[in-house]
């Protein structure tokens, strides 16, 4: 049995700074001893059913032996080597396999170590693509209300998370163009009209396809993506899909864009890319975008290169994760979880505080009318033995695809029970 309050926790927590956390009021953080499958075991012995899959990464559940074996084998041979001037099999094989999965038109993978940085790279690719052709005025990015693309400076500029995340940096963040998603003809016409007068200054349109995740699990129809593709084509601008959240099965298809039958010029991937084991991201571009950098002029090269890019351990984990999508029935599991989420969250629809219940793939979201007391709500979920971390007005589930039905039911029961007790 572990000590409920181990030394490392007592000593270390005076020196740690946690994300998205008011350290003064947040109270004691939960400390984790180990993870397994769909469970998180705390150092005090409690075992929680995980509803979040560690910020949507651990799609195969925790500690999948196939990924663990691949990482161990890679560690023996080469954990990392710089990617400047050197390449290696895991990174090249991963690039080739990712491009094969993405299909024609997404042909060149650039690896980084986080989602935000992969979006930064996508934005740099789009702007420099035009710059290299002498169109130096194309600096603007069309992004959307409710979107989230990261916490670095360029990505904060294209975010609208709906909660107070980036206000402290107003005035420093480059102003970008936030629009309403073209959910209907009228909004499509509004965006079209704006593009008619501004398109020559725009490098790209950037969108999270089908689900805006951190902005509140807001879902839209695949037709929206088709409209964006035709607007981008009509106005001669690039289209970027940020599939950092939606990629690798989360919305029911391996990539969300498959449901729309349209393809982006650049796509960003991360999170479930390594099955929740090691940090890795990829920005994959079309041959056309890549060709925009192909030149005898050294200044036309993409000037980006994080120290740990193409990390061999992370690439080995990603390759093993891709194996699992081939050898285990992940998309069928996503579909089954979708049914369970729909059934299990249905009772929430009649609760007085609930505005809407939404399900897409293995994502279930309950949107409340007003922001609840998040600390109290999170505490109530812990009491129920589940790890659910609502934000803003949204209580959501994004479980591992391998989560068994009875555990999904624990999660949905916890949500409907806890929300039913919310003070009116
Ligand atoms: N883009 C999307 C759609 C995301 O959901 C996130 C993270 O939640 C990011 C980008 C940023 O990724 P990271 O946290 O790895 O920097």
Image: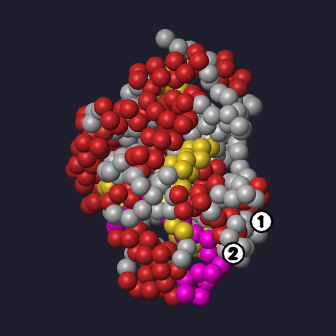
Q: Is residue 300 above or below residue 7?
A: below
Measured from the top left, where is residue 118 in percent x and y? Answer: 60, 51
Q: Is residue 10 above or below residue 258?
A: above
Q: Nearer the viewer, residue 171 or 94?
A: 94
Tell me the quarter of the picture where residue 179 sits. Answer: bottom right
- At 63% from the left and 34% from the top, the residue drawn is 87
Quickly name the residue at label 1.
Answer: 172
From where the camera sits, is residue 12 visible?
Answer: yes
Q: Is residue 322 above or below residue 371?
A: above
Mark 2 is surrounded, within 10 Å at the Cα level, by few (under 14), some (14 to 19) or many (20 or more) other residues, namely some
Assign a secondary structure to mark 1: loop
Of all residues, the one furthest to the front in this rendering is 296
Say whether disc 2 or disc 1 marks the residue closer to the N-terminus: 2
Q: Nearer the viewer, residue 406 or 190?
A: 190
Residue 210's disc is none
- At 59% from the left and 47% from the top, the residue drawn is 110
Q: Which residues are magenta?
A: 195-222
> Magenta segment: does it hold 241?
no
Left or right of 83? Residue 183 is left
């Amino acid at each position: 049995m572990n000590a409920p309050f181990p030394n490392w926790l007592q000593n270390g927590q005076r020196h740690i700074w946690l994300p998205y956390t008011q350290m003064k009021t947040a109270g004691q953080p939960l400390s984790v001893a180990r993870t397994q499958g769909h469970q998180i075991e705390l150092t005090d012995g409690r075992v929680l059913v995980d509803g979040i899959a560690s910020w949507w990464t651990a799609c195969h559940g925790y500690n999948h032996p196939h990924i663990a074996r691949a990482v161990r084998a890679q560690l023996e041979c080469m954990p990392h080597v710089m990617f400047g001037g050197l390449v290696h099999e895991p990174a090249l094989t991963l690039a080739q396999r990712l491009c094969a999965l993405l299909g024609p038109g997404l042909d060149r993978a650039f690896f980084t170590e986080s989602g935000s940085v992969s979006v930064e790279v996508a934005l740099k690719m789009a702007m420099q693509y035009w710059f290299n052709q002498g169109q130096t005025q194309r600096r603007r990015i069309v992004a959307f209300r409710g979107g989230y693309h990261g916490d670095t400076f360029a990505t904060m500029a294209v975010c609208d998370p709906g909660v107070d995340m980036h206000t402290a940096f107003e005035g420093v963040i480059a102003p970008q163009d936030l629009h309403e998603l073209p959910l209907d003809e009228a909004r499509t016409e509004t965006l079209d009209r704006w593009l008619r007068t501004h398109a020559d200054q725009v490098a790209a349109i950037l969108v999270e396809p089908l689900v805006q995740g951190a902005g509140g699990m807001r879902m839209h129809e695949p037709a929206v993506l088709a409209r964006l593709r035709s607007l981008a084509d009509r106005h001669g601008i690039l289209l970027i899909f940020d599939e950092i959240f939606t990629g690798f099965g989360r919305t029911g298809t391996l990539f969300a864009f498959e449901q729309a039958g349209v393809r982006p010029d650049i796509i960003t991937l991360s999170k479930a890319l390594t099955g929740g084991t090691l940090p890795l991201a990829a920005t994959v571009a079309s041959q056309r975008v890549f060709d925009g950098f192909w030149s005898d002029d050294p200044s036309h090269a993409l000037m980006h290169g994080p120290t740990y890019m193409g990390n061999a351990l992370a690439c080995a984990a990603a390759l093993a994760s891709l194996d699992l999508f081939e050898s285990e029935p992940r998309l069928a599991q996503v579909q089954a979880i979708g049914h369970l989420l729909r059934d299990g969250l249905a009772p929430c629809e009649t609760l007085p505080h609930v505005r809407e219940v939404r399900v897409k793939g293995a994502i279930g979201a309950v949107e409340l009318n007003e922001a609840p007391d998040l600390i109290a709500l999170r505490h109530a979920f812990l009491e129920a033995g589940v790890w659910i971390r609502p934000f803003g007005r949204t209580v959501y589930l994004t479980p591992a695809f391998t989560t068994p039905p009875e555990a999904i039911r624990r999660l949905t029961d916890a949500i409907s029970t806890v929300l039913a007790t919310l003070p009116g």
